[in-house]
Image (cartoon, rainbow, N blue to C red):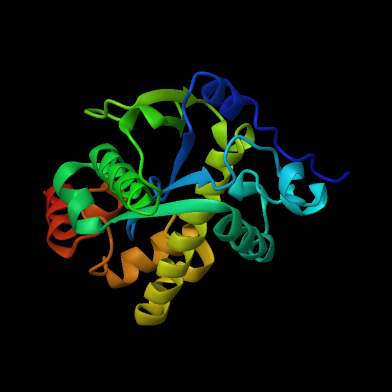
Amino acid sequence: MAAVPLAFDQEQILWVQGHQYVVGIDEAGRGPLMGPVVAAAAVWRHGILSPADVSISPATFALVRDSKKLSPKQRDVALSLVEEHFYVGVGIVAPEVIDRVNILEATYLAMKSALSNLRATLPKHRDTDLAILIDGNQTLPNVTLATTTLVGGDGIAPSIAAASIVAKVTRDRIVDALDAKYPQYGFAKHKGYGTAEHMAALRRYGPSPVHRMSFKPVKMNIPEVANRKYSQVMQ
């Protein structure tokens, strides 16, 4: 059965309230053991309109949905569609920053950076012209723009779905580049998640410079920590 295109219902609510730009925000990479966390912000370019108003076929627009439900090839096609029909901003926070501030705070930083970069691409606007839709149940701290959180938002609101595609493809491409630099870990296969293959490589080689040293599975495989743990067991 073909996927049904997402409706702009959530965006419409905010458009009716007078917000010209409804910003969808999503992230990729909170759970992996390595690499950056990436956030994206996306706004429908065509104003208070539906896809039909700009002659996009329903079958094509159906690809603008939860990025996790798309194949890599579909995500590449969807990304081209998003870049054509949405204003986009991206925020990237490196693993060393994640280690310093924790993953939640790093995710907030990535989202705020994505929002700031998006706003730089928008036509002249005021704060009251914007409203934010965030995937999940956590709002952005210290942001005064009108904000709505949506659990499962990437499967509900096209603006969040568009952001999820941009964030996912951006992070996957970064991880693929890191795989070429550190091929022994198999990053391209598991994208940094704690699979059996990844954990075996961590035990064999120890962490790479792009691993998140504050994450417990990585920390326990830092040589000095692992040796200390082994010594304690032997005592």
Asked whether residue 191 appears in the rendered view, the answer is no
- Residue at the location (65% across, 37% down)? 49
- Residue at the location (53% across, 67% down)? 189
Residue 54 picture location, percent across and down? 72, 49
Residue 231 picture location, percent across and down? 12, 54
Asked whether residue 208 appears in the rendered view, the answer is yes
- Residue at the location (51% across, 25% down)? 150
- Residue at the location (56% across, 30% down)? 152
Closer to the camera, 213 or 13? 13
Residue 39 picture location, percent across and down? 39, 49
Residue 107 picture location, percent across and down? 31, 42
Q: Is residue 105 left or right of residue 78?
A: left
Quarter of the image containing the N terminus? top right
Number of numbered callouts drawn: 0
Single out the residue that lies furthest toward the right. 1
Q: Is residue 162 left or right of residue 34?
A: right
- Quadrant of residue 92 in the image? bottom left
Q: Is residue 158 above or below residue 228?
A: above
Q: Is residue 85 left or right of residue 205?
A: right
Q: Is residue 6 above or below residue 185?
A: above
Closer to the camera, 186 or 16? 16
